[in-house]
Image (tube, rainbow, N blue to C red):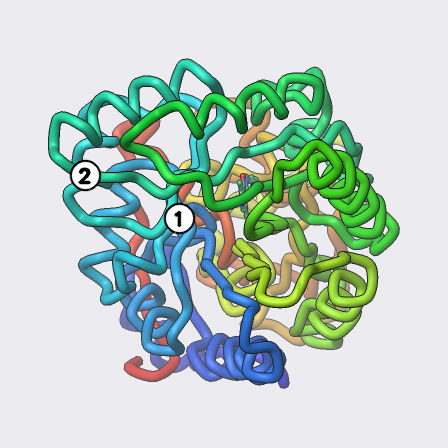
Amino acid sequence: MTTKFPIEKFKSLPTPFYYYDIELLQQTLRKVASTLSAHPLWRMHYAIKANANPRLLNIISGMGMGADCVSGWEIDAAVKAGFKPESIVYAGVGKSDAEIISALNHNIGCFNVESEAELSVLNELAGSLGKKANVALRVNPDVGAHTHSNITTGLAENKFGINKEQLEDTIRLTFTLPNVTFCGLHFHIGSQILDMTDFIALCNRINELSTQLQRKGLPVGDINVGGGLGVDYEYPDRFPFADFDAYFDTIGRHLLLHPGQQLHFELGRSLVAPCGSLITRVLYVKEGIHKQFAIVDGSMTELIRPALYHAFHRIQNISSSEPLERYDVVGPVCESSDVFGKAIDLPRCQRGDFIAIRTAGAYGETMASQYNCRPLPKAYYSSEI
Ligand code: LLP
């Protein structure tokens, strides 16, 4: 499955913009749905933070998936896009009162609670509305992941979750609070994880905890393993799908579940990253002393990942089949970090050529900003263009 770019159609569109390959998205979702259909107790909650474009959300909710939200606004977006409120889980270390009240009024499926302080506030607010909130406790499993330090979340030093040492007391606390119902445990160790041994380590840690708690007469309820499955940023056309088989197989084999125990997933990136590209035009080719720059009209305000994490995205000149030359591909924003890639070999670039920055469907459009008063990016879809 290779994304084909309708270059003739692009010619009438102002750049930069996001282009979504809807067929690729649908094929990805069908792959995941077919695995889930074989496991009646497995539930997928798409992590809205990866991409909240309403068109994509509609397609994902249409596949019967739930949603993983981290703000009241994400919950609103999810409900608007057709996700069933009871399939929504809500995480976040800093949920405001207004967000909690809104989530309670939507009757969402579960709050992934990150501290005792939050638990008490949730209990109080639920009581004031005459409601009972389902709660999963987010555990900090103290499991590292082989990924960028800015996107690991499961270490004791991270702000996320309740430490293992405090978990037993927090579970007991839930039983004393009249307006919350303890439903299970939630975990998430990080993002862009390609090494399955990280997920094995997570499963082992969950099994260990479950056994300890069980011995103390505290059954853990359902398990939510979070998200984190990575994608291939190097070769978007050769590997357009994340390795869902390895991922589900790893979790299925290593996590010990009791009969009737539900298993929840919160994948984001792996569902949407490959289907999105940022399309930008070459404005100028500038000769430096030791290098040349392809200055494009897209920037870190549309796609911040290279500037923020030194993330690699495949860059392609989709207009030219001239011989290769070497460029630093940079945007117009007044920051030295506004660079999409350094020393990139591309077919010779000319003013007006379209440059596709690939695998940008996750944490691209959602992380866009208006720095330099730039407008937020538009999006076009393969199914409509
Ligand atoms: N569940 C929780 C609790 C999370 O914090 C995250 C992502 C996910 C699920 C979804 O993870 P995924 O399957 O997408 O890896 N902006 C960064 C990534 C931040 C991830 C934050 N949490 C990036 O561009 O790489």
Q: Quadrant of residue 121?
A: top left
Residue with the mark numbered 1: 89
Asked if residue 333 shows in the view, the reply is: no
* Amino acid on which the number 2 mark rests in the picture: Lys
Few, some or many residues within 10 Å of mark 1 (<14, 14–19, 20+): many
User: Could you tell whether 14 is left or right of 101 in the image?
Assistant: right
User: Which mark identifies residue 54?
Assistant: none
Q: Position of residue 200 (x, y in %)?
A: 84, 51
Q: Residue at x 30, y 80 (%)?
A: 385
Residue 161 showing in the rendered view:
yes
**Residue 148 falls in which quadrant of the image?**
top right
* Quadrant of the drawing holding the N terminus: bottom right
User: Residue 150: horizontal and vertical position, in percent?
Assistant: 65, 28
Q: Left or right of 26: which side holds 164?
A: right
Look at 65% across and 49% down and name the residue there. Answer: 228
Q: Is residue 103 left or right of residue 320?
A: left
Answer above or below: position of 253 versus 190. Answer: below
Number of numbered tags placed on the structure image? 2
Residue 131 disc label: 2
Task: Report which quarter residue 238 is drawn in.
Answer: bottom right
Residue type at tag 1: Val
The residue closer to the viewer here, 39 or 338, is 39
Relative to 262, say whether 59 is above or below.
Answer: below
